[in-house]
Image: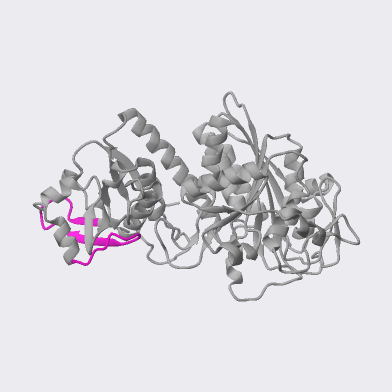
Amino acid sequence: MTLPKLALISTDPAQAQADAVIIGTMPDGDGVRLAPGGEAVDTAFGGGLVEVLNTLGATGKTDEVVKVPTLGRLPAGLVVAAGLDQPGQAGTVSAEQVRRASGAAARSLAGTARAVTVLSTVDLQAAVEGTALGAYTFDGYKSGSRDTPLARVDLASPDTGTAREHRTTLKAAIAIAEAVATARDLINTPPNDLYPASFAERARALGTAAGLEVEVLDEKALRRAGYGGVLGVGGGSVRQPRVVRMRYRGPKARRKVALIGKGITFDTGGISIKPASHMEEMSSDMSGAAAIVATAVLAAKLKYPLEVVATVPMAENMPSGTAYRPGDVLTMYGGKTVEVLNTDAEGRLILADAIVRAGEDEPDYLVETSTLTGAQIVSLGRRTAGIMGSDELRDRVAAIAKATGEGGWPMPLPEELRADLDSKLADIANITGHRWGSMLAAGLFLREFVPQGLPWVHIDVAGPAFNSGSPWGYTGKGGTGVPVRTLAALLADIAENG
């Protein structure tokens, strides 16, 4: 990963030795006004900075970045005005507004050696996360000149709180940003280098370095244990499947949380092959697994008072003479049988194995995330995850996802759709056979494997996990790392409130 170095400063940011100083703007009539923290910079302009920005056509809207040369008025050669948009009804700027403005400013300063930001005086954690993730780059496969990211950002300390509190916030925010960047790195690694065995070894290395207990099950161990879903999906590839188990035992752990993520390192659709158009994006079908691996490591770094057990199934879904077929019946881990009607509904098969195995650990909560259905994108678009599961936990996670800025919407599990998963041959079929409510039907399928009475949630990030469009805010092209920040906030909430 490539992230800038981040440090707190208590000196006047307008006098900081830097190449650029970042301030916030908000709409004001036909022009802008400065957000809190920009007063000292405005003073250096003799109170005329707003006039300059208005002359340049600044609007203060989301993702806007306007650069103004200081012409010697400041040690920094450039003022970067990042739009925060209108404050909320209470007259305050939200964390997500600060995060997005910080990210847009950081992206615009690629190649800059040092910047200082005053957005941190509005919300320190949001400014750290937005700056780090906005500056993130992934260019390890370029043979020529590489992109030079923003190297260092100094963050002006907030007026409220103690220096110790600020350092604690900075440390935690950097750890969260690094976890998101870890997930992004894994997602952005091409599938010829990231396949089940290599992904498992990278997970092992990350987990071991963080002090986690890590177990990797190869195809022989999977066969002995009866992981029929993982073996069925991975059987068409010469790159055999894996299941990774990562365990963190926190100090004075009061709750146990099971984390599960879908790790399809490449998805052709198998025998039910996908169209060629945009198939290259199916290297991101392991985004859920990447998020879970990164979150398990983060739990150890932040020392949550929890026991966290991650179960991560990994497979490559390929068509071949050994591939599973529509019409096959798979015996899943735990003994339930599934009739395969479509081999492109493979994620739920490997997740079912993982869910049953995770349930044997008797967790207090089960949390699973995956790029599970194209129907999520049809229903909710590319930025809003579909969240299903036990009503109370589903709504709790949806609220947390919204608060983190990653976004999510609680979805139902209509009982009338369950009958459409009935099979004449097996206990259940892997699809309904029609398009209606297919995101919800996938949630119903997963529910069949969750232990009775266990609070559980499924986060479908088919759209949000990968950005194939233009960069925005702190989100560049490629893997986004969603929903790492939601998972981190959920673990913190469980640690605090049970």
Q: Is residue 199 left or right of residue 169?
A: right
Observer-nearest residue: 348 or 386? 386
Q: Position of residue 469 (x, y in %)?
A: 47, 68
Colour style of the rendered protein structure: one colour
Q: Is residue 154 left or right of residue 371?
A: left
For image coordinates 80% across by 62% down, the residue present is 420
Q: Position of residue 126 (x, y in %)?
A: 38, 45
For image coordinates 25% across by 62% down, the residue present is 66
253 is within the stretch colored magenta: no
75 is within the stretch colored magenta: yes
Which residue is most to the top? 252
| Quarter-of-image position of residue 246 | top right
Q: Is residue 436 left or right of residue 48?
A: right
Q: Position of residue 494 (x, y in %)?
A: 57, 34
Residue 64, above or below 176: below
Q: Is residue 475 left or right of residue 455?
A: left
For image coordinates 28% across by 37% down, the residue present is 158
Q: Is residue 154 visible?
A: yes
Q: Is residue 3 visible?
A: no
Q: Which residues are magenta?
A: 56-80
Residue 45, above or below 9: below
For image coordinates 20% across by 37% down, the residue present is 11
On-image quarter of the C terminus: top right
Q: Position of residue 31 (x, y in %)?
A: 22, 62
Observer-nearest residue: 456 or 285? 456
